[in-house]
Image: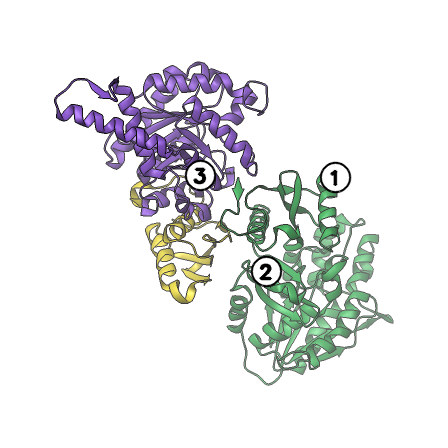
Chain colours: A purple, B green, C yellow
Amino acid sequence: MTLRRSMLFVPGSSAAMLSTAFIFKPDSVMFDLEDAVSLREKDAARLLVYRTLKMPLYDGIERVVRINPLSSPFGHDDLQAAVRGGADVIRLPKTNTADEVHELEAAVAEVERDCGREVGSTRLMAAIESASGVVNATSIATASPRIVGIALAGFDYVMDMQTTRGDGTELFYARCAVLHAARAAEIDAFDVVFPDLNDEEGFMKEVELIKRLGFNGKSLINPRQIELLHNAYAPTQEDVDYARRVVAAAEQAEADGLGVISLNGKMVDAPVVENAKRVLNRAAASGLRK
Amino acid sequence: MARRYFHKAKVVTEDLQFYTVNPISNRVERKDIEQLLARCGLSYEEQIEAFVVCRDGNELVACAGLQKDIIKDVAIDPDYRGGAMSLKLVSEITYLAHSRGLDLLFVYTEPKNAEFFRGCGFYDLVEVPDRVTLLENTPIGIRSYCAKLARQRVAGEKIGCVVANANPFTLGHRYLIEQAAKACDWLHLFMVREDVSLFSYKDRYYLAQENIRGIPNVTLHEGSHYMISRATFPCYFFKDRGIVGKCRTAVDLLLFRNHIAPALGVTHRFVGTEPFCPTTNKYNTDMKVWLQEDVSKAPPIKVVEIERTQRNGLAISASEVRRLLRKGEMERIRDMVPPATFDLLESKYAALARPVTDT
Amino acid sequence: MELKQESLAGTLESSDLFIRISPSDEPLEVVINSEVGHQFGDQIRAAVVETLEMLKVTKGIVIVEDKGALDCTIRARVHAAAMRAAGVTEVDWEALS
């Protein structure tokens, strides 16, 4: 089970950040070739990201590369750098339809074949940044077996909706739609970047909300938020104690050859066991909530 | 994107945007630049053609300006100093210059602030103690230039040098060069390279080439950034306030004494007396200080002034030739210039005779 | 790769390097100024020269201001600067891998 609580954005043009961001230990790092890179630096960023991917700097951290749209003059070159470099996941920005995912899937497979990488080994993630993307979220989430998650991107979305970022009301429908599409497709769901870098209280409020809704995690641009986010997602001692008993009961039932798991005299369903395993996994990853 | 994650600075993260501003067309940006400069104790330099600025949100926190190949008005808000800002700012101004076709860049600074630029890929060219340091953005600029010059070194006890703009080349120039060549074992003649005069560098160089024929011991050199250029002698090319204005002639002359003269083994520098042009007159006076006196570790260079030739009781000067050219008085010019100059004036410049800003 | 124009790549920021490449008729001249030059000067030079060799750049002047860049950064910056100087926009991925 891969934890994807934090996805740290790193501008692909910043050598300083590419060569140091691993020290913050995010679950995933997203090397950005798109909006964070100026037109002047698109060529150089591609080479930097490629070379960085080739180094063992980010061991244990999932490496995502956000490419430019395939319809732009940069998308296909970005893909070469990312797939050949060995990126774990390609993040497609501004995804509006399932067809765009199909197009990406074909392009990725071609590069995989060209460079001798196992076809299918590059995973995909689609970012939803418009009203039509939100409306099509279900078909996007199920467009390819390579898709491991969909992410909502707030900045472009609120503009498309003719509104601005506020207390979260403006994202209410989009969050629910993206999350339902992800859960129905059995993939992960990521929430938007929190825009105010210095508002810790506001950040924590938003984290509580998206965790309650059921998001796997959030995109981040401030590395200081990683620890806060991981802590918020960390289970309490109480959660862990209960999860341990659930898992122990499940193991007991299996050892005894029983089809039914019971805890404290009550029957426990399979999803409860799955959830308990997730809790233990998170506890192992980040420790208990402080 | 947010920067400065890795520096223990007052501001932990910030949303820094760098971009280019045309200060002439954008009054809003210019006002903010002026305010930042004032906060940093600097004054706005009118001749700056483009700025790189940095904003943190709405706040203008850094700027650097470009006047041709000279970086000016570099200012960083005190809250943003000490981190990566200076390095980012100098990187961006270098890219801006590159996009304008300029790669060799210069900066004037007070000697106490020179370290800032040394940390940003700039290297000392010359320092006028307690007044100004001129730096260039390459470790091999002056060095490789002097290495090339050294290949044209000629052995001798008395090696002379003349630096001329020759706008255009007159009989006065011919006389000066002849006299100088007679007085020494070998003479090096440099043409001022900047293309801001009425006559183009190409034409001025061609005329020098034609008009020094018959003088056996002279080498004609291409001019360079390091000799009476916008960079080394800005006051000659534009009126300047601030630090660049203050240094006047010292930078150019010390650069000659410390680098160029040793490369060629120059012992004497020859100049014509200059009754008409105050800038050139001042330059000649200053020459005696900066080349001869104990102001540098490099050996002194003797300054030799040669009286101008006269024609009908008037000293021949290039400015007089330009004046006559504008008035269309070609016949009077004939007496003042060698045949090659006259031919070129007649064929190329006579038709253009109309008021032109000149230097 | 034939160099046609002066080019820049990188920045002067920490962990990066700033590189300037100029065309020239002389054999390659590489000048490196590094904060960690006394310790890593040879490695930095090797990374610069190897990358230029891979790109078949044999003539030109290369000036590097290193601010403690990792090997991967050095190679990426040199590569970008050489492509810009040569006016080449397509990366030869096969040569790279």
Residue topped by disc 1: B27
Residue at image mark 3: A226
Callouts 2 and 1 close, C-beta under 8 Å: no
Residue B344 seen in the figure: yes
Residue closest to the far front: A265
Q: Nearer the viewer, residue B66 or B11?
A: B11
- Which quarter of the figure has residue A217? top left
Mark 1 and mark 3 on one chain: no
**How many neighbours does mark 3 have within 10 angstroms: few (below 14), some (14-19), or many (20 or more)?**
many
Name the mark on residue A207.
Answer: none
Q: Which residue is mark 2?
A: B117
Pointer 2 or 1: first along the chain: 1
- What's under tag 2, amino acid-wise? Phe
- Closer-to-camera residue (B81/A175): A175
Query: Residue drawn 53% across and 41% down?
Result: B2
Question: Where is residue C21 drawn, in percent x and y?
Answer: 47, 54
User: Please, which chain is the residue tagged with disc 1 on?
Assistant: B
Q: Position of residue B200 (x, y in %)?
A: 67, 55
Query: Label 1 is placed on what type of residue?
Result: Arg
> Relative to A159, is B66 above or below?
below
State which mark lies toward you, 1 or 3. 3
From mark 3 to mark 2, how far is it between C-alphas?
36 Å
Task: Please state if A69 lies on the left or on the right of A258 as rendered.
Answer: right
Q: Identify the subunit bearing mark 2.
A: B
